[in-house]
Image: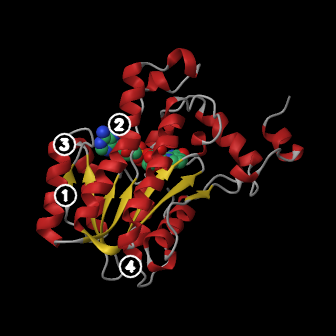
Amino acid sequence: MAEQNFPTGQLMAGKRGLIMGVANKNSIAWAIARQLAAQGAELAFTYQGDALLRRVKPLAESVGSDILCECDVTNDATMDSTFATLKEKWGTIDFLVHAIAFAGKDQLAGSFIDNTTREGFKSALDISAYSFVDAGRRASEIMNDGGAMVTLTYLGSERVIPNYNVMGVAKAALEASMRYMAADLGPRQIRVNAISAGPIKTLAAAGIGSGRHMFRFNKAASAMQDNTDPMGVAGAALYLLSDLGLSCTGETHHVDGGFHAIGMPQEGPLRESMPD
Ligand code: NAP
C-alpha cells in the first residue's frame, strides 16, 4: 500500500483492541490498524510464526504497540494464550478486528464442484469462518460492554466469482456467523459487523486464480471505475468500531467502489480494458 496519511483525531482514544491478520504492510488489517492508531487506539497484534514476527514487529512498534501474540487460529493453545495475554496486560478490551482467511491454492482455481475436497472445505471454513466465532467468543469474555467487532468478507459470498470457490462458501458462513454473534452480544451493546471489501492486492488475494483479470474487471465494472482503496476499508472499520457506528450491528457493509450495486456495467470502460 502506498504511504498515505490517515485522518488523525480522538475517536478511538481510551480504546484498546486486538488486530488479527497483519501479514505485511499490504494487509488490509494493517491499513485498519494505522487508521485506528491515528485516532488514538491502543493496539495488540497476532502473528503466525517467526517469519511473520519479523515483519509484524516493526509495524506494531511504528504504532506504539508492544503486545504481539503468536496465534494460529486452528490451535486452541495459541488462542488461549493470546486472550490470556490481553487479560493480563489490559484486563479488558474494547474491539476486535478479524482479517483472517485461508484456503489451499488447489481449492481456489477451476471448477468448484470438481475441485472442492472434504479437507479443503473443512479447513477453509475452519480458518476463515469458525475462527471469527471462536475469537469473538473469547474477545467477548474480556470486552467492555459497548465494544465492537469487525470481520472482513468479500462479494464471493453472495455471487459466483470465478476461482473464489470454497472461499465464497466460507465467506457466506462468516457473514451468517457475524449476524448470530451480533444477536447474542447485542444486549451488552457489543456490535458485530462485516466489511465486504473489493479486491485489494495482498498476499491472500495473490492466492486466487486469475487475479489480474479480477482487478481489471472490477476497475472497469464498478460504479466508481476504480479498484478499492484500503483507506476506504480502514475508514469503514473506524466508523464501525468507534462510537460513530452506534446502533449499527449485524451489517455487511460493502466498500468496493459500488461494484456490488451494478447489474450490468457501462460498455465503454469494459470495452477499453477487455477488448473483443
Ligand atoms: P493478508 O495480508 O494475506 O492477510 C490474511 C491474514 O490471515 C494473514 O495475516 C494470514 O497469516 C492470516 N491467516 C491465515 N491463516 C491463519 C491461521 N490459521 N491463523 C492465524 N492467521 C491466519 O490478506 P488480506 O487480503 O489483507 O486478508 C485479510 C482479510 O480480508 C481476509 O479475510 C480476506 O479474505 C479479506 N478480504 C480480502 C480482500 C482482498 O482483495 N485482498 C477482499 C475482501 C476481503 P499468514 O500469512 O501467516 O498465513
Residue at position x 33%, y 45% in the image:
131
Q: Nearer the viewer, mark 3 or mark 4?
A: 3
Amino acid type, mark 2? Asp
| On screen, residue 17 above or below 112 | below
Residue under label 2: 126
Circles 1 and 2 in contact, beta carbons < 8 Å: no
Q: Nearer the viewer, mark 4 or mark 1?
A: 1
Distance from disc 3 to disc 4, alpha carbons, whole Å, reads 30 Å
In-image side of 100 versus 256 (left or right) = left
Circles 4 and 1 in contact, beta carbons < 8 Å: no
Q: Residues within 10 Å of mark 3 (few under 14, many from 20)?
A: few
Residue at position x 42%, y 27% in the image:
121
Q: Secondary structure at mark 2?
A: helix
Amino acid type, mark 1? Phe
Nearest to the observer: residue 42 or residue 132: 132
Residue under label 3: 76
In-image side of 150 versus 210 (left or right) = left
Name the outermost residue toward the left.
88
Q: Is residue 5 at all visible to an observer of this figure? A: no
In-image side of 266 versus 167 (left or right) = right
Q: Secondary structure at mark 4?
A: loop
Asked if disc 2 is less than 8 Å from ligand 1, the answer is: no
Residue under label 4: 12
Labels 2 and 3: the sequence-earlier one: 3
Residue at position x 47%, y 71% in the image:
238
Q: Secondary structure at mark 3?
A: helix
Q: Is residue 138 at all visible to an observer of this figure? A: yes
